[in-house]
Amino acid sequence: MIGTLLPAPVSVAEAFEDPPGLTLIGLEREAVRTAAPKRLAEFTTARWCARRALAGLGMPPVPIPRGRRGAPVWPPGIVGSMTHHDGYRAAAVARQADARSLGIDAEPHLPLPDGVLELIALPAELRRIAELSGRHPLVHWDRLLFSMKESVYKAWFPLTYRWLGHEEADIVMDPAGTFTAHLFASHPRVPPEGFTGRWTVDRGLVVTSILVPPYPTPSGGAPR
């Protein structure tokens, strides 16, 4: 599913179950040393997906440990993102020449629990959700907004190493399958216009993705 949302320079791998016999590598084990079996399985399968995605870029298997705020630490020259939910694990990676950052997220296509939408949505977003729900009632727009904000954060953090609150991104959703995120926080490595992304609903899941374009290449020079 994620593969339908991202262009060819991005390598994607996904799984709809936890295959038996998967193992972690090196420092990965420390992150889940005391984890419950469910957490261990989803963490392990997500790393397996990540190594399959890296193989699509011609890279050998490597550890992908947790870094600051739990973000995955990718090999030099690589950007990527992972997501996992019951029955779904996925990873997307790209070379820095093709993407500045990536963010992916998957959530159940179900309404958010009571009270959650009011915690994550801006007043303008609440108005848009009410309008979209009237026009397209088969989509759970509240859950979609939550997933989009998760993808925004996953794309933002590797560029800035700073927290980004839900209230710092104003998201406009397009029923055609795209969205834009206008950010109220700025950073030199983040495009001033914010992020654009794509979304889909399939197999009982809401899936969202963001690809931040690579840095502009000065005429006659290499990317920054």
Image: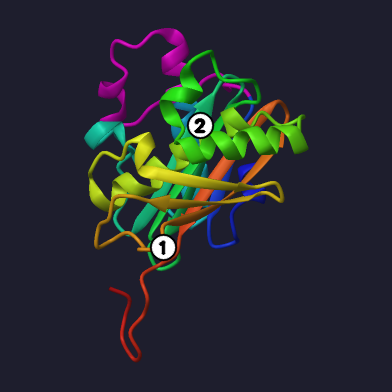
Could you say whether the residue bearing mark 1 is in a helix, strand or loop? loop
Residue 158 inside the magenta-drawn segment: no
Residue 59, image x, y percentages = 43, 54
Number of numbered markers:
2
Compare residues 198 and 19 and report the one nearer the observer. Answer: 198
Q: Is residue 87 left or right of residue 27?
A: right
Amino acid found under the numbered disc labelled 1: Glu
First along the sequence among labels 1 and 2:
2
What residue is pinned by disc 1? Answer: 193
Residue behind mark 2? 146
Q: Nearer the viewer, residue 65 or 137?
A: 137
When the figure is inspected, residue 3 is found, relative to residue 88, above or below; the finding is below
Q: Secondary structure at mark 2?
A: helix
182 sits left or right of 163 in the view: right
Q: Report x, y in % for residue 212.
A: 44, 59
| Residue 90 visible at all | no
Relative vertical location of residue 74 with respect to residue 167 in this rendering, above or below: below
Q: Residue at x 33, y 84 (%)?
A: 218
| Gap between marks 1 and 2 measured at Cα | 21 Å
Nearer-the-camera pick, 213 or 29: 213
Give the quadrant of the C terminus. Answer: bottom left
